[in-house]
Amino acid sequence: MQRFISLIFVSFLLTGCGIFTLYQPDIQQGNIITPPMVEKIKPGMSRAQVESIIGEPILSSLDPNHWAYVYTFQEDGGEIKRKSLDVYFSNNHVTRAVSTEGMIKTD
């Protein structure tokens, strides 16, 4: 009988592990995009200059004149927040950059 009670107790403990999670790590994916980074992107900049500020884009587009930067962040298992930055080129120079945070640069 004691063995049966111990088995039930252990099963309750193991079941509770999935329900009462105390810690959920923050999850960051993609290119970190900050407002100061976006502000540095100016029309006329070269691809190398953009890459030195933000890094290589995570997503490659079928259009060689479009770089897409995407960043997602989930804090403590909460809502997933998404930011993106699209940089457009002509003759290997920036023509415009559009950000999800409302920061838009045009020629």
Image: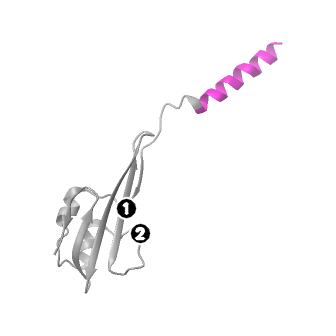
Is 49 located above or below residue 73 in the figure?
A: below
Q: Are marks 1 and 2 in contact (CB under 8 Å)?
A: yes
Nearest the viewer among 9 and 64 is 64
Instruction: Determine if the magenta segment contains residue 43.
Output: no
Screen quadrant of the N terminus: top right
| x then y, percent, for residue 33 | 29, 58
Task: Tell me the residue at 36%/81% (across/down).
Answer: 64
| x then y, percent, for residue 9 | 70, 19
Nearest the viewer among 66 and 31 is 66
Secondary structure beneath label 2: strand
Screen quadrant of the C terminus: bottom left
Q: Residues within 10 Å of mark 2 (few under 14, many from 20)?
A: few
Q: Residues within 10 Å of mark 1 (few under 14, many from 20)?
A: many
| x then y, percent, for residue 73 | 38, 49
**Residue identified by numbered label 2:** 59
Is 93 located above or below residue 70 in the figure?
A: below
Nearest the viewer among 36 and 68 is 68
What amino acid is labelled 2 in the image?
Answer: Leu
Secondary structure beneath label 1: strand
Question: Which stretch is magenta?
Answer: 1-18
**Residue identified by numbered label 1:** 70
Task: Tell me the residue at 45%/40% (across/down).
Answer: 77
Mark 1 and mark 2: Cα distance apart in space: 8 Å
Quarter of the image where one finds residue 89: bottom left
- Residue lying at the far top in this picture: please name it: 1
> What's the mark number on residue 44?
none
| x then y, percent, for residue 5 | 76, 15
